[in-house]
Image (spheres, grey):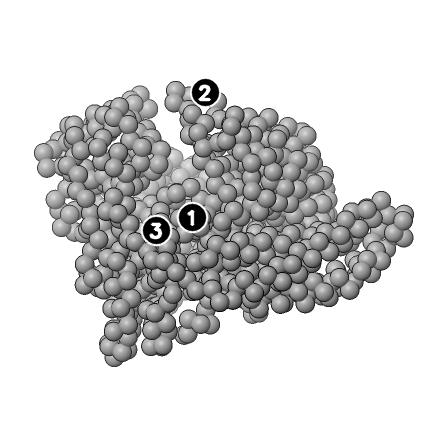
Amino acid sequence: MALEFIGGSILSPVIQVLVDRLASRQVLGFFKSHKLDDGLLEKLKETLNTVNGLLDDAEEKQITKLAVKNWLNDVKHAVYEAEDILEEIDYEYLRSRHDSSWAWNLVPFLNPANRRMKEMEAELQKILEKLERLLKHKGDLRHIEGTGGWRPLSEKTTPLVNESLLIYNDEKVDQCFQLKAWVWASQQFDVARIIKEILDKINASTCRTKEPDESLMEAVKGKKLLLVLDDAWNIEYNEWDKLLLPLRYVEQGSKIVVTTRDEDVAKVIQTVIPSHRLNVISDEDCWKLFARVAFSGVNSGAVSSLEAFGREIVKKCKGLPLAAKTLGGLLHSVGDVKEWEKISKSRMWGLSNENIPPALTLSYYYLPSHLKRCFAYCATFPKSCLFSKDALIDDWMKHGFLVQPRGVEEMEEIGEKYFDDLVSRSLFQRSTHDSFFSMHDLVSDLAEYVSGEFCFKLGINESGSGLEGEHSCSLPERTRYLSITLAAPYGGGPRIFPSIHGGQHLRAFFLSSEVDREALNDIWPNLKRLRSLSFVDLKVISSQLLNSIGNLKHLRYLSLSCTAIKRLPNSVCTLYYLQTLLLKNCRHLMELPSNISNLVNLQRLDIEGTYLKEMPPKMGKLTKLRILESYIVGKESGSSMKELGKLSHIRKTLSIRNLRDVANAQDALDADLKGKKKIEELGLMWGGNMDDTRHEREVLERLEPSENVKQLFILGYGGTTFPGWLGNSSFSNMVQLILSGCKNCILLPPLGQLQSLEELYIKGFDDVVAVGPEFYGSDPSMENPFKSLKILKFEGMKKWQEWKTDVAGAFPHLAELFIAGCPELTSAVPRHLPCLLKLSIEECPQLEEGIWMRV
């Protein structure tokens, strides 16, 4: 793999999409129907192609020349403006297909929206002129050579890779300490949060009647503790004392390690903990770290031919582990000696930016163009914050950063590949928290540098510092992504929210915590180009604010989760670009707008925790829907199971509620659950009282899922027996099965043939009297029924009297057996349970104690 084919401008993919859009049927039709100048489209397309040809050269030179960086930023701003306008044209095309009151082919002077059409044409003309002016200055991009040098950072801020985690997790360290905790201190040293995290890491529970510091004191008293406080900033003496107070009762030999790059922090803690200033590592150690990453999985013959240039590269890392590791990730699997030589002699080693090592800049420059945009977006994250893989991939999707190659259907797969690439290059690193990642502070600095004014991050402390004038801030015109972190004032009280001016080009606005709704009034009228909007946990949303959401034509992501909204305005159904709509835990929401089927690009709808009575009509029109955790069957034909059958891309989790309202068993078959191969977790829920047990069985018979399902929940089923598919050995992926509230059922299904089943919960089978051979299955080839089962729970079976256990080889790996609320049960459990670790019997008075003693 050659690096010259990897790099590329961050703008190249955007421009390619723009060029394609300019030639699309929608845009051409829009210009012709409104008698606009379609020659403008061709000129703009040619100009964009010319600009694209200059970008790669400018991408490298902008790192050393401010003039070139400014030129690139002007180009980027103009390209993003063009993208906004073409999206608006696409929006109008989509609106014409769904809104009968809006006529695409109206005579121009009769069309009330014609003024806006002319404005869009004029704006595209201005963008063309701007790009042409920028091209006239293309000579500025020639004959520019990088100058200057780079000085390694002082010892005070020496960046280190988290190699210390390897030591922390070593077995020898485990033998020396009874308790261990690694906690991220963060820029806001919050003692309460840190204590709670320590308790969590040492698996100590908190008592409701005690303060967290008391719980910590009791948990560590007399025990040897290793505590690592990573990346500490802004520690005050009194806060440090608060943390130390419950830790004074640990056993002698306990250790507290604090990592910081702030001299003031070192002065605060050195009265208790001696400070140790870390130096850069030797070239040989740097080489070992580099080689471990760069040559992972590479044969020794290939290593010998690359080692000379590799050692030259390592020398230029100046003993910085992060630099060595990042460049190792860059060169991993690159076997061409010429590419290694190119890196070792790159002009970028002469960079004059003393805040960012050249190795990191090199790593960014050689990123593929599609990864550059994804990485630069991370400049919106507060330093040292933790982020999840799935959430970041969702962000990339909603902002259109993922490029979908032919033959790849799932955008999530593309996002996972992008994310894993950034991890392999050490730009993202795993945190001590499961499933979370972070960026080293220097990598965060790099993201801020390459994103420039396009990503604006505003951190406001409790005094309001960080703002200009009287708590106000003017956004740069180029800013597309804004994040605001508000610190809680000491002793409580209202958070300080700035008065923000500008923001007319903002695409995303992130707020770290709740503010008074009035605080949004200044900026809200400008946010017409938002792609992403979240009001999560905002207790009150004004009706004016809620109703105006429908004006955000470019919106892709809308989260109103955990808010007190009672309804969604109908105008939300005109957000034709919307991909994600999150309404989780909106406890007062009773229905969705009837026209929600107009959201033809919707891919995710979350209505968990709402009180919807049924789905709105024509849900089957949402053919791009992929994540729909709940589907609520309605009595009307438009919200029947048939509509679910048209949603062929549903994946991951699906719960179907109100199955009692399925009037025709054929509708259940039309839902085509068997054809939905990507569903891994399926819930089938009836609800209410069922009188027609035969109809219930016919419905469940036709709800047979795909054999790929891993977790299955059947709740409130009213039939007397289960269909033949449940328990079939073809469900080889099923690991968890819950059967609950099946009150009319008289026989348990043959579940012993489920080869991968690990957890089985059976609850509320009121009419089951005996559990016999049918439970284990009738397949003669099955030597060990329930061969993978680890947890088995029976609960609330009022009439159950007998459990026939004389089946050889059953439950060979059962570790937990729980039986509760079975007052008539008198017979023994299986005698031979070689792996049983936990046995719990509750509310089963008829069981003889002597029988259990033999288990």
Along the line of sight, the residue nearer the viewer: 497 or 51: 51
Residue 374 position in % (x across, y down): 49, 55
Q: What residue is shown at x 80% (from left), y 60% (from top)?
A: 37
Mark with earlier residue (2, 3)? 3
Rendered image: mark on residue 388: 1
How far apart are labels 2 and 3 at the CA level? 40 Å
Which amino acid does the dot numbered 3 rest on? Answer: Glu
Front residue of this view, candidates 803 and 281: 281
Q: CA distance from mark 1 to mark 3?
A: 30 Å
- The circle on residue 493 is 2
Q: For the residue labelled by badge 1, is the local secondary structure a helix, a strand or a loop?
A: strand
Pointers 1 and 3 in contact (CB under 8 A)?
no
492 shown above or below 16: above
Secondary structure found at label 2: loop
In front: 209, or 819? 209
User: Which of the two discs, 2 and 3, sits closer to the camera?
Assistant: 3
For marks 1 and 2 on the same chain, the one whose residue lies earlier in the sequence: 1
Amino acid type, residue under disc 2 in the picture: Gly
Residue with the mark numbered 3: 354
Tell me the distance, in whole angstroms, between the alpha carbons under discs 1 and 2: 31 Å
Position in image of residue 485 (x %, y %):
46, 35
